[in-house]
Amino acid sequence: KPGDIADLVSLGDNLERVLDLWRFRGFPFPQVSQTTQLDTVHHALLGVFSLTHGPAARIGEIRILGEPWTAERIFRRELTFQNDDRFDLRALRASRERLLATGLFLDVSIAHVAASQPGIVDVEISVSERPGLIKDCLISIAPAYLQSEGWLGIGLAMCPNLMGQNQRLSVIGQISALRQLGDVQWVEPRLLDSRINLAINAHRRRLIYPLF
């Protein structure tokens, strides 16, 4: 406002917020032109800004860039927009937050780009998946010896993003001459793409007392 210290960074941020108001209303590519003049007498910067919102648009193709391990349907079920919706930058930002909330990604970028057809914008999604959630399960097997039961084997398998479906599977087992123990847990955070969380647990307990 008049009298503030000229800060071009803050000025640019404020102009982006103004342009966002148009992006919230279906205009993906508003523009601002500006002319500035230095007033050496009053030590002031005079600025004139002209804003044009450009044409409104609807959403065309939704593309997931790269080859993420996570399945495409996991992406699409978190989106708050779909093909042929009126463009709204708020929907893109909300979808980014929902994808981050899955815990599968370190970072998510959702950008809109002009399509070849007038009045249409395509949406491009790129992600950085969390290390340890890509493709492979963690498997560990180790021997151990206990004086009370002799040699035994301990195994652990954990799949935090099973087959890219955002399902979690963990298996823990212990086998010896006296005991065979096992625990299996499978978790589906969104059953049939709903908001219902389903967890299935299975346990095996077996004790052998040969001298009892």
Image (cartoon, grey):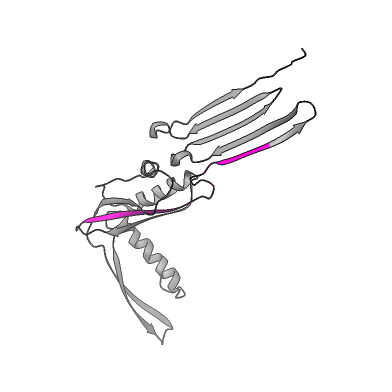
Q: Residue at x 35, y 62 (%)?
A: 18
Is 126 covered by the magenta stretch? yes
Q: Can residue 166 be seen in this view?
A: no
Confirm whether the magenta stretch covers residue 72. no
Indicate the position of residue 203 as horizontal and vertical percent values: 59, 24
Q: Residue at x 37, y 41 (%)?
A: 73
Q: Where is residue 70 in the image (x, y as percent from the top left)?
A: 43, 45
Write down the region rendered in magenta: 119-142
Q: Residue at x 74, y 15 (%)?
A: 210
Q: Which residue lies furthest to the left in this view?
A: 118
| Residue at 66 percent of width and 29 percent of height | 174
Residue 146 against residue 84 in the figure, above or below: above
Quadrant of the drawing holding the C terminus: top right
Q: In which quarter of the image is residue 17?
A: bottom left
Task: Classify 29 as above or below 74.
Answer: below
Q: Work out whether 27 lies above or below 84.
A: below
Q: Which of 167 and 22 is in front in this view?
A: 167
Q: Which residue lies furthest to the top in this view?
A: 212
Q: Nearer the viewer, residue 18 or 122?
A: 122
For residue 66, say whether it is visible: yes
- Outermost residue to the bottom: 41
Q: What is the magenta segment's predominant secondary structure?
A: strand
Q: Is residue 69 left or right of residue 22?
A: right
Quarter of the image where the N terminus is located: bottom left
